[in-house]
Amino acid sequence: MEIELAVVQRDEKEILRNLMEKYDYELSQYGGDDVNKLGLYGFDYLDNYWQEGAKRWAFFVKVNGNLAGFAMILSDHFYLNDKESDYTMSDFFVMYKYRNAGVGKFATNYLFDMFKGIWQLNTFEKNANSVAFWTRIINDYTGGIYEILPNNELGPGNQVFLFTTAKM
């Protein structure tokens, strides 16, 4: 199995938007979001990824040349519970067909190696599979050196990991 990440180009943003609909549908069971009058969830900030000076990156995850998911990263100085971070994984999605096959681990490790610094990563506590995935990924990558921010400012039902990707 050949896994790769490819930067999403501006002329590919509709492909990303289509994948995001599948992701948002899956997340709606935890966040309770409804579709709009067109039957879509929509994502208001997608164009921001291609604005000049944007501190945002979008990647397609591909397996054997086929679309398998995406990863979206924001870079700014974020503060939660008075803790600063450099990056956040704003959205991450691997389609069911490619789960439990090492695709997510490959993609996250690739991105953590590429974007060195302090990360925060938010999960819905109700999404037990996501929490288990991120706990395993972050624990393995950092050797168990990470924090889970208690009573975080994102509100109840959110769990925020804080960790660094700077290898020693």
Image: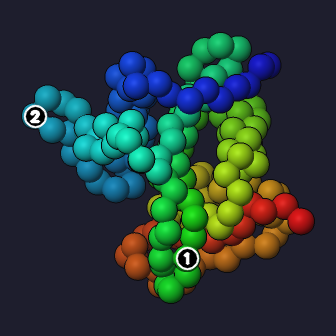
SS assignment at label 1: strand
Q: Residue at x 39, y 36 (%)?
A: 50
Which numbered dot is residue 37? Answer: 2
Q: Residue at x 50, y 28 (%)?
A: 8
Q: Residue at x 51, y 42 (%)?
A: 57
Quarter of the image containing the C terminus?
bottom right
Q: Is residue 39 above or below residue 31?
A: above
> Comparing marks 1 and 2, which lies closer to the viewer?
1
Q: Assess whether mark 2 and mark 1 are in contact (beta carbons under 8 angstroms).
A: no
Quarter of the image containing the N terminus?
top right
Which numbered dot is residue 84? Answer: 1
- How many labels, in total? 2
Left or right? Give the position of 150 relative to 53.
Answer: right
The amino acid sitting under disc 2 is: Lys
Estimate the x, y position of residue 12 in percent, counting from the top left.
42, 20
Estimate the x, y position of residue 163 in percent, counting from the top left.
69, 69
SS assignment at label 2: loop
Rounded to the nearest angstrom, the CA distance separating label 1 from label 2 is 38 Å
Q: Earlier in the sequence, mark 1 or mark 2?
A: 2
Where is residue 161, by image quadrant? bottom right
Where is residue 132, by image quadrant? bottom right
Estimate the x, y position of residue 134 in percent, counting from the top left.
65, 56
- View extreme (left): residue: 37
- View extreme (front): residue: 52
Q: Is residue 81 above or below residue 31?
A: below
The amino acid sitting under disc 1 is: Glu
Q: Is residue 60 above or below residue 25?
A: above
In front here: 84 or 69? 84
Q: Residues within 10 Å of mark 2 (few under 14, many from 20)?
A: few
